[in-house]
Image (tube, rainbow, N blue to C red):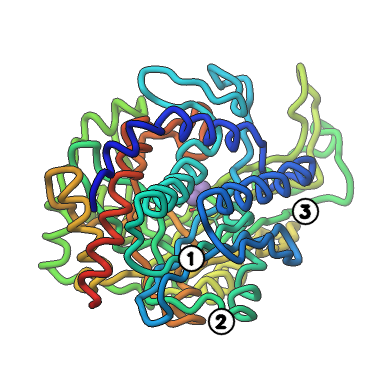
Amino acid sequence: MQGVQSYIDTHKDRFLEELFSLLRIPSVSANPDFREDVFEAAEFVADRLRDAGADQVEVCPTDGYPVVYGEKIIDPDAPTVLVYGHYDVQPADPYDLWHSPPFEPTIKDGKIYARGACDDKGQMYMHIKAFELMMQTQQLPCNIKFMIEGEEEVGSANLATYIENNRQRLKADVVLISDTSMIANDIPSIDVGLRGLSYLEVEVTGPNRDLHSGVYGGAVANPINALCQMIASLHDSNRHITIPGFYDRVQELSTSDRHLLNQAPFDEQAYMDDLGVGGLLGEKGYTTAERTGTRPTLDVNGIWGGYTGEGSKTVLPSKAYAKISMRLVPNQTSEEITMLFQKHFEQIAPQGIKVEVRPHHGGEPVVTPTDSPAYLAAAEAMTVTFGKAPIPTRGGGSIPIVALFERVLGLKSVLMGFGLDSDALHSPNEHYGLFNFYKGIETIPWFFHYFSQNTR
Ligand code: BES
Ligand code: MN
Ligand code: MN
């Protein structure tokens, strides 16, 4: 690889301008109000792929938002890298907590502030620019295919069908993804695992209508009180989850794997300071790295019901709701865990309370190899550009399609992410460092270089 840095230096302002244009499109997949914008983002990505030199570029319709495909085949016999990313973003709510508008990208202290800056527009766009760089400097060493989707943040429900119907087109040797984090800008790392997810909503019903809380209070079950109690009972005093069978398939790590995982540098004080908390809370007997990377969890994501407007209203509500997610680890499956939750939650409902559990979406956990030519290529690439070998880590988040790449296409993934956990993904003031954006563009060509060398 030659002239990587000088190409970036020459074109860095344009790279950033282009990313800003993408960040200005509010492609929120969860909210139908933004439907047109999500389609516009797909077209934008397709146009930039064409500009960069991709062939067969297509905005492929699905039952949901489209998949953007593009490729450059230099030699049918050469190895092929499938690059995956997503152009949709999480809702920006609550807007009033943003210091600058979420869809007007702004640079502050060397960071790009915008919804999607890191997750995943900024990281995905690095791949299009690295591809442009390899094309323009005539150094693309193997075949490349892009599959950029628009429904990752809502569970990738239509992507399974897309990959099943496009097995031939998506044929590759490995999937390369930048949609995860590193430990720090001077401590490169590569995620070698992702948690799965079971996401559901519960509706708890008490009386058939809202009641006067004085006239009936004390005699009739209050669904909000009941829901809180039921939720509280899902953890014991050691922060273990109490759903029967929940841990049955959980793979305990070997002592040496645990040791390795805990060797990754972790500054607990800095972690707490960043979050503004005075202490950490999690499952007894496990470190923070283990709790987020290798242990299953259960969290309430939202809870509502009754009167929440101005002032007060004395009401004993008829209904209460919560959105609940469980993060899963090998070998739990989202289907079984959803079923166990449902059974248990219905069972613990007190008298006079009806429970309905509505599953949303799921995703399966994955562990990726550290001895494959592709992982080694990523490690070598980061070693060149960071001057340090990356540390393998386990990511706590989920990317549902990764398990399906394995199951449907037989493809392993490399999770070469350049974000930081502190980039405020899904939160107000999401940001992405300029350092990280350009470092990614610099590192990716080296991945291709080593990957084609390692597979020759
Ligand atoms: N990029 C994240 C996942 C991630 C972030 C993994 C940081 C590891 C480190 C992805 O966009 C995401 O947010 N996924 C969702 C999946 C869900 C909506 C199905 C998640 O993890 O909540
Ligand atoms: Mn993402
Ligand atoms: Mn996300």
The tag on residue 72 is 1
Q: Which mark is residue 167?
A: 2
Q: Amino acid at mark 2?
A: Arg
In this view of the protein, which residue sits in the foreground, 348 or 164?
164
Secondary element under disc 1, as helix, strand or loop, is strand
Residue at figure coordinates x 82%, y 39% from the top left:
216
Q: Residues within 10 Å of mark 3 (few under 14, many from 20)?
A: many
Query: Is residue 229 at all visible to an observer of this figure?
Result: no
Q: CA distance from mark 1 to mark 3?
A: 56 Å
Residue found at the far right of this picture:
209
Q: Is residue 385 left or right of residue 299?
A: left
Dot 2: few (<14), some (14–19), or many (≥20) neighbours within 10 Å? few
x, y (%) of residue 142?
A: 35, 68
In the picture provided, is 37 more to the left or to the right than 116?
Answer: right
Residue hosting label 3: 205
- Residue at the spot 43% in from the left edge and 82% down from the top edge: 410
Q: Split into 4 quadrants, where in the image is the C terminus? A: bottom left
User: Marks 3 and 2, Cα distance to the nearest angstrom?
Assistant: 46 Å
Amino acid at pointer 3: Thr
Q: Secondary structure at mark 3?
A: strand
Q: Quadrant of residue 105?
A: top right
Circle on res. 239: none
Q: Which of marks 2 and 1 precedes in the sequence? A: 1
Q: Is residue 419 above or below residue 448?
A: above
Q: Position of residue 189 (x, y in %)?
A: 23, 50
* Cβ atoms under marks 1 and 3 closer than 8 Å: no
The mark lying in front, picked from 3 and 2, is 2
Q: Amino acid at mark 1?
A: Lys
Given this view, does label 1 or label 3 mark the residue nearer the observer? Answer: 1
Q: Secondary structure at mark 2?
A: loop
Residue 266 in the figure: left or right of residue 413: left
